[in-house]
Amino acid sequence: MTAIERAFGASAGRMGSRRVRHMQCRGLVVPALLLVAWQGLCAWGIFTPDVMPSPIAVAADLSRLWTKGQLLGDIAITAWRVALGFLLGTAVATVLGAVVGYSRRVGDYLDPTVQALKAVPSLAWVPLFILWFGIFEVSKVVLIAVGVFFPVYLNLVSGIRSTDRKLVEVGHVNGLGRIDLVRRILAPAALPSYITGLRAGLALGWMFVIAAELMGASKGLGFLMLDGQMTGRPATIVAALLLFAVAGKISDALLVAVGRRVLVGQDDFASAQAKAAR
Amino acid sequence: MTLQISGLTKRYDDEAGRGRAALDRIDLEIHEHEAVALVGTSGCGKTTLLRIISGIEHATGGRLTLRGEAVTGARRDVGVVFQEPRLMPWLTARENIRLALLDLAPSAQAAAIDDLLRDMGLTDFADARPRELSGGMAQRVAIARALARKPQVLLLDEPFSALDNFTRLKLQDHLDVLWQKSRFTLILVTHDVDEAVALSDRIIVMRGQPGRVYLEVAVDLQRPRKRTTPEFQAIKEEVTVALDLS
């Protein structure tokens, strides 16, 4: 490589990374506009402080909670519950989804039951889980795991079953055994769908943690919301809501980053767009 | 005798129990090291016949033996190249070829893959993924994968039909060279009469629905074959007439 090529390469790289940073910043435009509009509506008195506090009031409340030393603990315990529930739900969904997706016969036995359980509203599990696991951590984690389970399971089963028959035939004519067929063809083919399931499952995990914390907790963002309601502090409720949104977005971004690393060789519309943007 | 087919039939039944016959009483013998082309118009069952020989599908009736053994499924000594390259998009060219060699030790895999990549002129594209390859290159990777197990029989299902004319001619020449070098038994399904005459020792013309063997034409021409010679053109004409295309 010549010095000129190196210089052009480096400059193209700099331009590319600048462009990527630019694209990432686009996602901040709508929240910033909403924030400005929200502050404006509060300043003009359209939103009254007892119903919808201003962003400045919410920021002040967040600062108060931070100074009190409560905020970090609440975020940490909620994130911990979501993480545990996510891992548990994902583990069970992955094993069951892989078996049901691979074996039509096992699917005939298991899938109708899973589909029926999917129709049970999440809150309907609460009394039973409290009865079985008590009011403390286990019931909360299990409830979150139930929420995570279904999207991961459904997407994995669908991903495996919709693997291109022609690729599976290549496996057969090349003498791949069951394990190699799953490892080298079915699993990679199902990966995009599985990652979509993980993202949907994680989003549901954040939803279910509120239900879990509302059913009885002395710490966590759900508890913070409940506390805000009990003590008549709408700023605390909105602050907790915003924290949920931020935590959900960060955890989703982490999953997307992992997905980008493991999904190689994709030749779809999204990857073409990403390539064009680089 | 490498492949013996007698009275082979294939029917597809839909859910309502209505049947459609795809192949009707096929009798065929293919000898070791022979290059045979199955030629026919769309829907005459030539791909079905190839899929049955490869073990992907099963016949409804009749008998099919390969080197004396009944074909019940995919076999190690049979390589298959499909109409499309069917490469795994998430694997590189090298890894796609490796799929056929998983039962070998890693060092043996690497040596065999390097040889195949060199034979197919793909050394510089060993680490490219399918989306980075042209149609011709992708099909060469597919051929390399099929040859990786050093098959006694190579089945090709219209392998060049999706390629442009120039690439098709180049790959046909390449296949001819590979066949002359390795002398595997070659069974080529094609609707391209030119391709059949250029690559095979015998052309089997299939016709009808359900498909039947209509005619067998020996191609006794020296390789590599010149497509403009009167002998080449005469065989091409005979097959074209048999296909009722003229």
Image: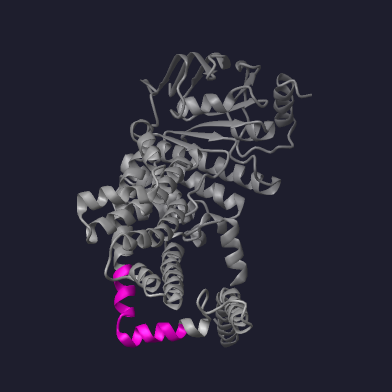
x and y percentages locating residue B216 in the rendered image: 61, 19
* Res. B76 visible in picture: no
x and y percentages locating residue A149 in the rendered image: 36, 50
Residue A243 position by quadrant: bottom left
Q: Nearer the viewer, residue A267 or A134?
A: A134
Answer with left or right where residue B233 lies relative to residue A13.
right
Residue A85 position by quadrant: bottom left
- Secondary structure predominantly adopted by residues drawn in magenta: helix
x and y percentages locating residue B203 in the rendered image: 61, 25
Residue at left 52%, top 81%?
A: A55
- Above or below, B127 relative to A172: below
Residue A72 part of the magenta-drawn span? yes
User: What is the residue that sits farthest to the right in this orientation?
Assistant: B246
* Res. A219 visible in picture: yes
Question: Which quarter of the image is occupied by the C terminus of chain A?
Answer: bottom right
Residue B45 position by quadrant: top right
Residue at left 64%, top 24%?
A: B43
- Above or below, B104 relative to B22: below
Question: Which quarter of the image is occupied by the N terminus of chain A?
Answer: bottom right
- Above or below, B41 relative to A138: above
Name the image colouring. Answer: one colour
x and y percentages locating residue B34 in the rendered image: 51, 28
Specify the segment rendered in magenta: A59-78
Q: Nearer the viewer, residue B11 or A242?
A: A242
Q: Nearer the viewer, residue B14 or A205?
A: A205
Q: How many marks?
A: 0
Answer with left or right where residue B13 lies relative to residue A153.
right
Residue at left 45%, top 56%?
A: A200
Residue A104 part of the magenta-drawn span? no
